[in-house]
Structure formats: structure tokens, C-alpha cells
Image (cartoon, rainbow, N blue to C red):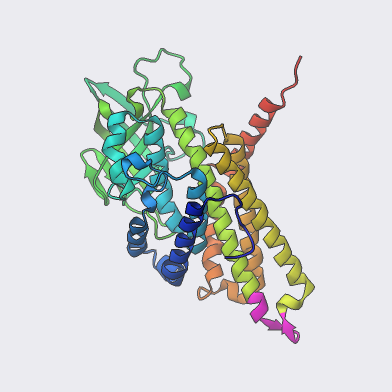
Amino acid sequence: MSRLAQTHGLTDVQREILATVRDFVDKEILPVATELEHRDEYPQAIVDGLRELGLFGLMIPEEYGGLGESLLTYALCVEEIARGWMSVSGIINTHFIVAYMIDRHGTREQRETFLPRMALGEVRGAFSMSEPGLGSDVSAITSKAVREGDDHLLTGQKMWLTNGGTSSLVAVLVRSDEGHPAGTPPHKSMTTFLIEKEPGFGEVRPGLTIPGKIDKMGYKGVDTTEMIMDEVRIPGNRVLGGVTGRGFYQMMDGVEVGRVNVAARGCGVAQRAFELGVSYAQQRHAFGRPIAGHQAIQFKLAEMATKVEAAHAMMVNAARKKDSGERNDLEAGMAKYLASEYCKEVVEDAFRIHGGYGFSKEYEIERLYREAPMLLIGEGTAEIQKMIIGRRLLEEYRLQG
């Protein structure tokens, strides 16, 4: 275990879980991650191993077959997994968000139907808010649900579904105006639907098409897709929570968990970049000694390590705040913003330490250099995080009188 990014106050169970995950990362992920990533190959063997470890049920309550662990435990596991290969952490993240939303907001029937199978990894989750040309402006969603008897017909195009192909359950946010008077604010006329589908590409249920994988600069292996809905018939018992018009709040609650996850990913990737940088600096010689002996490199290592520590501390604080039952949108936004920015900077410094070899696909840092930018835009861009942080600060520090 490294000196950096230690978390105090963990239980024996938490320490045991993290040690098991780290051992799995070192033995099963790191040796194969770069090769799989270059081939853009789905890491089926790794996913099977995560299922055997019970990680798909980490935060699902014990009564539904999960481990019933905290957000902090989950975030620390994500940090370890992202240290091995960030794409693998993406595979479990959307699954966790959907399971969390069903546990927190679902009906009893929805919890009993999905959570036991999600804990086993038999049902895999994905969630969808964004649309083409929409970006972070969730209020501008145009996908819609039209009521027909007890059912709803969903139509529209969604974008950026992580696990869009491999998932069998998608939580999707659409506009549903029935029962809401004209002039209702957009965020009060949105509903989350639980869409069950077959894994794969093409038409995966009547009216629902997953066209194929989006070719990406990095974050490979995991499938990122579009989703096209053409009057997909969804029964009323698959409205999350059983009541329309609450989807925006349900999704935002899930996104708070997701932003802690992205912060944890940034921490994990930054840790790995530091490990690669500090190791290479002691092996590479220039001007008669290891480059780690040169002050210019020592300064870089000092800055990198400080950023790893700071990002980890903010991520842990955001997770603990959510676990306490308090609102954590401010802390999650800060953690996501800082961790993603610091991750980019630490990776770039490690890349610079490697010199020309950092540009070679033979070296792991090349993969990290392509992966880090995704964290700057995932779960809301850095600019969106700063807007959230600024608004929340003005709420907290509003002038009186």
C-alpha cells in the first residue's frame, strides 16, 4: 500500500474489501489493461471477476442480496479499479447509479424485482439523460412519453449511454407532460422510466435501437452508445417510484453519487500516473544520474503527490457527507471538479517525465493521457461544476437584509 491517498477511520470490513480489490487490480487488471484498451476489447474476464467478488452488489442492501456498504466504500473501490483501468470503473458506475436510484426512489415491487438480480450482476444497469446537441442542459430534453391507457410510449434519441450495449436495464429521463398544467417548469415535468431490454446492438426490444459503439479517443473497452426510441411501450409499473414528474430530482440524486464516482476515478488515474512517473524517474538516467536526482523532476513529483492527496481528501469528504444523509451537491461538485483537473495535470506531468517514451503505445502513460480528458466532461463539465458550486455558495452565504 502506498503512502499517498490513505483513508483514516475505516472499519476492518472496509479495509478487507479494499485490500481484496487492490489485489485483484494488481493481478487481473493492470497486466492486461493496456493491451485490451488498444484493441478496444470489452474486458469480459475482468467483469466476471468483479461479479465473483460481489462488487456489483456493493451498495445494494443486504436484504436484496448485496453487501450493504456505504458510498465511501464504493468510492474507494472505484479509486482502486480506476488505478488499474478507468474503463472498468465506468462499467460498474452506471450500474451502481441505477441500483442506487431504484433503492432510494423505486417502489417495493421495483426494488424486489431488480435489486437481487443487480446484486448478482445478472441485470446490468445503464442510465440516460443526455441527447444529441443537449450537453449539460438537462432542462432542454425533448424525448417524451405519451400516455396510452396504463402504458407510456417513449420516443426520442438519447446520447452517451455508458454500457448502452451490455446493459439489460436502462433508467431513462424523458419529458412527460400529462397531468402537469401549461407553464410547469421543465424540471417538474420529467419522469424516469426503467426500460428492460436485451443486451447487444440493433433493435433490442420493439421500438428500441442501440445503433452501435461510439468510437472514442480513450475510455475504450466499455461500450458508449446512442439509444433511439420509437414509441417504446413501457408499462406504468416501470415509472421509477410509480409517479410521473419526479424524474429530474431522482436523476440529480443519482448524479451526486455519479460525481463522487468521477472524483474517485480521477483520484485513481492520478495515483497510477504518479506511480508510473516516480518509478520511471528513478530508472531513467540523464547527465550521469537518475532524473529523479534533478531538482526539476523532484519539483514535479512533489506537485503531483500533493495533488493526489488533495483530490483524495475532497473525494472522501464528499462521500462521507452523502453517507451521513446530508445534501452533498456542493462537496460532490468540488470533488469532481478538483479531482478531474488535478488528474489531467498529474497525468501530463507523468507524461513529461517519460519524455519521448510517453508518446509510445508501449508505455502505459500513453493510455492514461488519452483517458484523463473524459473526466473533465463526464457527469457534467468542469464549467457546469463551477456553476453548481457558485450557486450553492451564494445560497449558503446570501446577504441578510
Seen in the picture, residue 84 relative to 123 is either above or below; the reply is: below
Q: Residue 401: x and y, percent?
A: 76, 14
Q: Residue 386: x and y, percent?
A: 64, 39
Quadrant of residue 178 in the image?
top left
Can you name the residue that lies furthest to the top here?
181
Quadrant of residue 32 in the image?
bottom left
Quarter of the picture containing the N terminus is bottom right
Seen in the picture, residue 397 relative to 79 is either above or below; the reply is: above
Q: Residue at x 39, y 47 (%)?
A: 67
Q: Which residues are magenta?
A: 280-290
Can you name the residue that lies furthest to the bottom here?
288
In this rendered view, identify the residue nearer to me: 392 or 54: 54
**Residue 141 shown left or right of residue 356 in the figure:** left
Residue 7 on the magenta span: no
Residue 284 on the magenta span: yes
Seen in the picture, residue 377 relative to 172 is either above or below; the reply is: below
Q: Residue 31: x and y, percent?
A: 44, 72
**Residue 26 shown left or right of residue 118 in the figure:** right
**Residue 310 shown left or right of residue 71 in the figure:** right
In this rendered view, identify the residue nearer to me: 15 or 149: 15
In this rendered view, identify the residue nearer to me: 147 or 60: 60
Seen in the picture, residue 221 relative to 239 is either above or below; the reply is: below
Can you name the residue that lies furthest to the front here?
12
